């Protein structure tokens, strides 16, 4: 029904466009011929007046002009007749389409039937929840490992899904997390997420931090995981401009070595309102925000 209505609608638009075009042609032709008639009438009238005053030869010339005028009037009449026939044909076509066009009540009935069909179909399809879809996944499907930032973030992740577990080591540095990674067994169905580096940024230079990250990446590659994600050092509000520049430079390098080693990189820079007064640790809102960012990122790797 919808397709038929659409076809009828398209046909009506084509016919209406043809009518408009024909009417424009008729109007233009009539105006043009009217101007010619007026001009010819003026010339005939002047010729007749002049013939009455001048010689017989002049009168004969005026008679020829009058004959030409009559001929043009005949041509104009024929053109108008042809255009009128064309307009009549178009009007008949429009009437034919209108006869097939549904009435308002028919249209309303068709729309209601279509909407009812959609509602019935939607009611019969039950959307499976995320928890139900992955209910057979273990708590080690996603393991978040790192420093004290992981504690609050991990708690939010566990609250949202049974697939998340975490290991938070207060004051952990990159080398500390590397040692924890070495203890892990091979697990093809595990997504390992590492949050570390914020405790190195103040006490060590960029070159040392980069070298430590390279060692950590190397250890991650030696253990089988479904995926590995390194979270860049989150923005801190207790650093001066020099240390903030160091943080940004380290994150840029970390992103590059992750890409070259086919490891995922995730960045999170909280605004000041997401931090505690110390400018280092996340408040409850910041923890939840970072947890949701990790959650959304890890969903893409579920199989």
Image: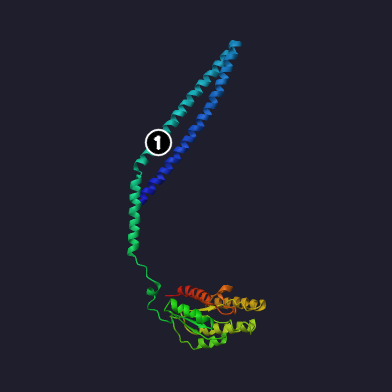
Identify the residue under disc 1.
91
Numbered label tally: 1
Work out which residue is located at the far right of the displayed protein and give it: 242
Q: Secondary structure at mark 1?
A: helix
Q: In the picture shown, does residue 30 fall above or below 165?
A: above
Quarter of the image containing the C terminus? bottom left
* Res 265 quadrant in image: bottom right
Instruction: Reply above or below: 93 against 245.
Output: above
Task: Out of 49 and 116, give the one closest to the viewer.
Answer: 116
Residue 288 locus on image (x, y percent): 50, 75
Q: Position of residue 160 (x, y in %)?
A: 44, 76
Residue at the image point whose x is 36% and y is 39% from the top: 96
- Write the residue at 54% across / 17% down: 64
Q: Locate residue 222, reporting x and y percent.
A: 50, 85
Q: Point out residue 215 in the picture as x, y percentages from the top left corner.
A: 57, 85
Colour pattern: rainbow
Name the foreground residue: 157 vs 79.
157
For residue 49, above or below residue 223: above
């Amino acid at each position: 029904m919808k397709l038929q209505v659409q076809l009828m609608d398209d046909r009506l638009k084509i016919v209406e466009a043809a009518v408009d075009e024909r009417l424009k042609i008729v109007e233009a032709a009539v105006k043009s011929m009217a101007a010619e008639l007026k001009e010819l009438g003026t010339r005939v009238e002047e010729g007749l007046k002049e013939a009455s005053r001048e010689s017989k030869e002049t009168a004969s010339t005026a008679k020829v002009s009058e004959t030409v005028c009559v001929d043009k009037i005949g041509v104009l009449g024929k053109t108008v007749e042809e255009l009128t026939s064309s307009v009549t044909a178009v009007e008949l076509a429009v009437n034919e389409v209108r006869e097939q066009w549904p009435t308002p009540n028919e249209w309303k009935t068709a729309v209601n039937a279509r909407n009812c069909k959609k509602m019935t179909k939607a009611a019969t399809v039950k959307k499976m929840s995320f928890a139900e879809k992955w209910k057979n996944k273990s708590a080690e499907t996603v393991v978040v490992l790192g420093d004290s930032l992981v504690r609050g973030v991990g708690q939010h992740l566990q609250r949202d899904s049974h697939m998340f577990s975490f290991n938070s080591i207060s004051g952990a540095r990159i080398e500390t997390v590397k040692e924890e990674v070495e203890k892990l067994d091979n697990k093809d169905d595990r997504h390992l997420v590492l949050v570390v580096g914020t405790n190195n940024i103040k006490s060590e230079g960029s070159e040392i931090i980069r070298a430590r990250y390279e060692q950590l990446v190397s250890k991650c590659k030696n253990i089988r995981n479904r995926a590995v994600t390194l979270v860049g050092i989150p923005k801190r509000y207790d650093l001066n401009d020099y240390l903030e520049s160091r943080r940004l430079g380290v994150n840029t390098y970390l992103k590059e070595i992750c890409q070259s080693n086919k490891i995922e990189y995730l960045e999170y820079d909280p605004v000041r309102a997401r931090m505690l007064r110390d400018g280092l640790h996340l408040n409850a809102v910041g923890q939840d925000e970072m947890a949701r960012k990790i959650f959304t990122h890890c969903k893409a790797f579920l199989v």
